[in-house]
Amino acid sequence: MTRAEASFPIKICGLSTPETLEAALAAGADMIGLVFHPKSPRFVMPDLASRLAAQARGKAEIVALTVDIEPAKAAELAQLLQPDWLQLHGSETPDAVRAIKAATGLPALKALGIATAADLQRIEPYAGSADMILLDAKPPKDAAYPGGHGRPFDWALLAGLDPAFGFMLSGGLDPSNVAEAIRIARPAGVDVSSGVESAPGVKDVDRIAEFVKAARAAAQALNDDALNDDMLKKAGKA
């Protein structure tokens, strides 16, 4: 495994069938997401989620996506599913993130919606609570559920972030634009859901494979560029 493959997680979220989950695993996805928000077209019932988690266990990290879940309910979900991560995709405050982590003993991936540069100010308060930040597009005002709803935001907004800040990027990514998104935003990982679907909630196995391949190649190129920059800096100091 190369450095890029080891350190650049690719997450396929909203999986709901054994066949598409297997496609994500076969493509080399590092993380798989199961959605526990009833209003989402990707919602999975607990019994199916348990079977999917068992299928993925040991092959990819399992992420349970929740929205404004209470700590006690999060603990029940964690016991049932035994995921590796909880993804908090609602309006959870930093204190709520800490409470959910304490109740479950699991790391938290906190999603934040981005539309303008001002939204980046929301990141800092979560630095001491979330284990990873997921930057997603803001949902439309009339949306029934959170998330980017297949729409990207302006990745150039992220140019002002500290280069050492590792975040996952989501929102409108698909096989055709993920390489450009990685080149511009320089994230620590990427997350896709609707961008690998043929219809809302219906994953396409070919698009999953195309996305992982494109993201992996772009991550390797990003890694190579960083190594080249390091070599040039060292040569300049010699």
Image (cartoon, rainbow, N blue to C red):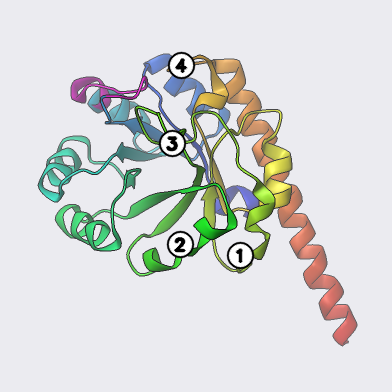
Which residue corresponds to mark 4? Answer: 200
Instruction: Calculate the distance from the C-alpha at mark 1 to the C-alpha at mark 2.
Output: 10 Å
Q: Are marks 3 and 2 in contact (CB under 8 Å)?
A: no
> Left or right: 14 with respect to 92?
right
- Say whether residue 41 is magenta: yes
Disc with the residue nearer the chain's start (4 vs 2): 2
Which residue position is annotated with label 3? 147
First in sequence: mark 3 vs mark 4: 3
Residue span colored magenta:
39-49
Do labels 4 and 2 touch, CB within 8 Å? no
Q: In this rendering, is residue 139 above or below 144?
A: below
Residue nearest the viewer, comparing 71 with 77: 71
In the image, which disc is placed on residue 47? none
Q: Could you tell me the amino acid type at mark 3?
A: Gly
Residue 163 in magenta?
no
Q: Identify the residue under disc 2.
A: 123
Q: Earlier in the sequence, mark 1 or mark 2?
A: 2
The residue at the point 32 percent across, 38 percent down is 65
How far is the residue under mark 1 from the one under mark 3?
Answer: 21 Å
Q: Which residue is mark 1?
A: 161
State the separation of the CA atoms marked 3 and 4. 13 Å
Question: In the image, residue 227 lies at what x, y percent?
Answer: 76, 64
